[in-house]
Image: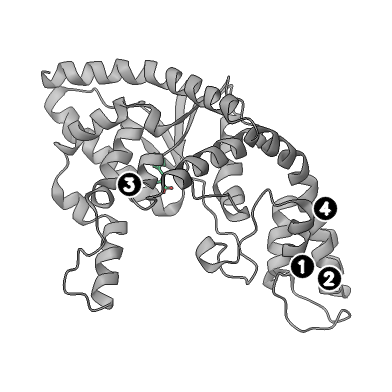
Amino acid sequence: MKRVLTGIKSTGQPHLGNYLGAMRPAIQMTKKLDQQESYLFIPDYHSLISVHDGNELRQSNYMVAATWIACGLDPDKTVVYRQSDVPEIFELNWILSCFTPKGFMNRAHAYKARLQDNEEQGRSDLDTGVSMGLYNYPVLMAADILLFSADEVPVGEDQVQHIEFARDIAQKFNHAYGDILKLPKPVISLAKTIPGLDGRKMSKSYNNHIPVFAPEKKLRKLVMKIKTDSSAPEDPKDPSQSTIFDLFKEFSSKDEQLDLAKRYETGIGWGEAKQALFEKMNEELAPKREVYEVTMADIDALEKVLAAGAEKARVVARKLLGEVRSAIGV
Ligand code: TRP
């Protein structure tokens, strides 16, 4: 049976972009139980690179875990854990760093983007704002993946280079010690771009986001804020140019989409289109919102779920780390 593993970073309260782009597909992935074993974790030590507020990191982790549970993740069937609860990852991280050419990291997209930004800002030190954590990010990610001998890693396009690094690092290690680390395959299935209130990519930094579990009233209010043009209700409208329609597609069946598309052609007021979107959205989110709220109200129970997941992960982790340690001679 193949093993599929992915990590989803916590970034505070999840918004619809996180939900539709990464979380919902990741939960769907965990449901193919007859074909695969699934590992889903929160890479909180990756978040530590940018989040330097203990409470914020802790809360963010809870919010992601609670969102997964609200979306129907079954912790008895999927191995679900916080990265920081699995110390074996960090031991492997060091070991792998000794097999990682520094030049790999110099080529990492995220690091290069920082250098370029510093250059554009006219800073004399191009490494301004680059911590060793940021620089080593791909090695830690390789450890996340290789420790569990993952066959496939579903990610967004922007993460493919990281999976390639993991493969390259594994090959360097295996070259010295034999076939101990499994080479993972990237599967590009996560992180499609979801438009926000102003039509740009939904993102907290643009402040155009809709929190997934905003209370119903607030959700409706935000949907009503989606930017539209000034066309009159009777004017024909193009669904392919409409943020409302793009979001509607995420929550509706093909028939419902055809139906709304027809109304776009024959004339529909933007307020009506928004109401249709809100209703479909709320239909999917309302029951999940309830589970989310119940889960967030009992952090002790949530901690237990995460602890049980970490224990399962560590059984697998210890075994591989044991083989690695023995191979390297410690
Ligand atoms: N870097 C990934 C992201 O930003 C998150 C991540 C960390 C991850 N470790 C991973 C994803 C291991 C897949 C496998 O989205």
Mark 4 sits near ligand 1, with its Cβ under 8 Å away: no
Along the horizontal axis of the image, is 167 left or right of 104?
A: right
Tag 2: Cα neighbours inside 10 Å, few (<14), some, or many (≥20)?
some
Query: Looking at the picture, how far across and down is residue 125, in whole percent?
Result: 17, 69
- Residue linked to disc 2: 271
SS for callout 4: helix
Tag 3: Cα neighbours inside 10 Å, few (<14), some, or many (≥20)?
many
Whole-angstrom CA distance, mark 4 to mark 1, is 24 Å
Q: Which mark is residue 224?
A: 1
User: Is the residue under label 2 in contact with that under label 1 (CB below 8 Å)?
Assistant: yes
Tag 1: Cα neighbours inside 10 Å, few (<14), some, or many (≥20)?
many
Q: Which mark is residue 242?
A: none
Q: Amino acid at mark 3?
A: His
Front residue of this view, candidates 51 and 220: 51
| Residue found 60% across the figure and 66% down from its top | 208
- Residue linked to disc 3: 162
Q: Quadrant of the C terminus?
A: top left
Mark 2 sits near ligand 1, with its Cβ under 8 Å away: no
Mark 3 sits near ligand 1, with its Cβ under 8 Å away: yes
Of callouts 3 and 1, which one flags the residue occurring earlier in the amino acid sequence? 3
In front: mark 1 or mark 2? 1
